[in-house]
Every structure is written in C-alpha cells, then in structure tokens.
Image (cartoon, rainbow, N blue to C red):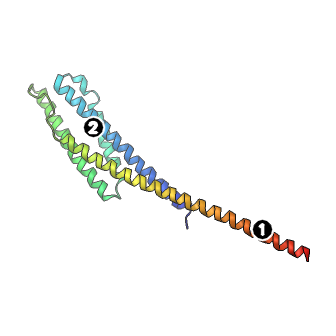
C-alpha cells in the first residue's frame, strides 16, 4: 500500500515547509534590520544607517513573493501573508514619509512611533507556528510510513524464512521416503 511515491511526496512537503520557515525567518531578520536602520537614522540623522536600506526592502519584497508562491495552495497561510504584506507596506510607507520629512528639514521626528511592529511580529509568528505544525505532522507521517514499511519487510523476511523452512522440511520428508 505504501510506496516510494508516498515517501517522495511527504519528503517534498517537508522540504516545502522548511523553505517557508527559512523564508519567513529571512523576512523577520530583514524587517528587523530595516526598522533598526530607520530608527538609527531618525535618532542620529546619519545617512550611513540607511546603507543597504533599499536593498533590504527589495529583498523582503522578493521573499514575500517567494512565500506567496510557496503557500499558494494554503488559504490560511496566504491570508496571513497578505496581512503581513499590508502591514509591511504600511510600515515602509510611513518610514519613507518620515525620511522625506527629515530630508526637508523636519527635525521633530526622533522615533518611528508605529504600532505596526507588533502586527508584523504577530502575523509572522502565526505563519511560523502553522508551518512548524505542518512540518511536525509530516515528519510524523514519514516516521509512521517508515515503521509500516519496516514491519512489512520484517514480516516478509519471517514469512520467507517460514516458507523456506517448510519447503526444506517437505523436501527432507520426500528424500526420506
């Protein structure tokens, strides 16, 4: 009943869940770096903190697109990802607006003053929790499949041994007659 195709299917599902987790962690790290760079810039108005800021925004956008591709068959994950993307884009929009205001001489901005950070963390945590749950379930399925196959092999070996023993006994009896 179980075959190599089932092993491959479960293995691919495990690999895909791992990719989602890896990409989500990359988004978390890059988003934290973007926020940290912006906060440092707002506090010091030192443009060196913005080095790589646009590259990081591009990387997060690409990682989000990759996550959408990886989760396209999972409505709940896609919904969480859409929620994250909306919050992320709002965050970027506010950060860019604050940056423009500073560049135009407004020195009253000294922090991000955003509540979006909590929404981002909550949404990404939900994505990671769901993928970890799926990953654990798939690993258990794979282990169960391996145990069933191992049991089948052991039964096959025992049955083969019994048949060979019975055949030898039958041949031994025929020889004695």
Identity of the residue drawn at 14% across and 31% down: 100
Q: Is residue 53 left or right of residue 158?
A: left
Task: From the image, state whether disc 2 or disc 1 is nearer to you.
Answer: 1
Q: Is residue 166 left or right of residue 99?
A: right
Residue 70 image offset from top left, x and y in percent: 37, 52
Q: Is residue 146 left or right of residue 168?
A: left
Between discs 2 and 1, the one toward the N terminus: 2
Specify the label residue 165 is tagged with.
Answer: 1
Residue 66 image offset from top left, x and y in percent: 35, 47
Q: Which residue is mark 2?
A: 31
- Quarter of the image for the C terminus: give it: bottom right
Mark 2–mark 1 Cα distance, whole angstroms, equals 68 Å
Q: Is residue 96 left or right of residue 125?
A: left
Seen in the picture, residue 38 relative to 63 is either above or below; the reply is: above
Dot 1: element: helix
Toward which corner of the image does residue 169 lie, by quadrant?
Answer: bottom right
- Which of 17/167 is in front? 167
Q: Are marks 2 and 1 in contact (CB under 8 Å)?
A: no
Seen in the picture, residue 160 relative to 48 is either above or below; the reply is: below
Dot 2: element: helix
* Mark 1: few/some/many CA within 10 Å (<14, 14-19, 20+): few
Toward which corner of the image does residue 47 lie, by quadrant?
Answer: top left
- Quarter of the image for the N terminus: give it: bottom right
């Amino acid at each position: 009943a179980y075959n190599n195709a089932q092993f491959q299917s479960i293995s691919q599902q495990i690999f895909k869940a791992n990719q989602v987790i890896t990409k989500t962690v990359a988004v978390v790290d890059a988003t934290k770096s973007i926020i940290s760079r912006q906060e440092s810039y707002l506090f010091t108005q030192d443009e060196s903190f913005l080095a790589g800021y646009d590259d990081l925004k591009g990387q997060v956008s690409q990682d989000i697109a990759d996550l959408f591709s990886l989760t396209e068959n999972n409505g709940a994950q896609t919904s969480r990802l859409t929620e994250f993307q909306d919050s992320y884009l709002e965050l970027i929009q506010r950060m860019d607006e604050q940056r423009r205001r500073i560049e135009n001489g407004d020195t009253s901005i000294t922090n991000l003053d955003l509540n979006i950070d909590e929404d981002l963390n909550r949404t990404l945590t939900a994505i990671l929790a769901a993928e970890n749950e799926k990953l654990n379930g798939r690993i258990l399925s794979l282990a169960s499949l391996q145990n069933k196959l191992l049991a089948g092999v052991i039964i096959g070996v025992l049955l083969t041994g019994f048949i060979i023993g019975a055949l030898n006994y039958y041949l031994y009896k025929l020889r004695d007659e």
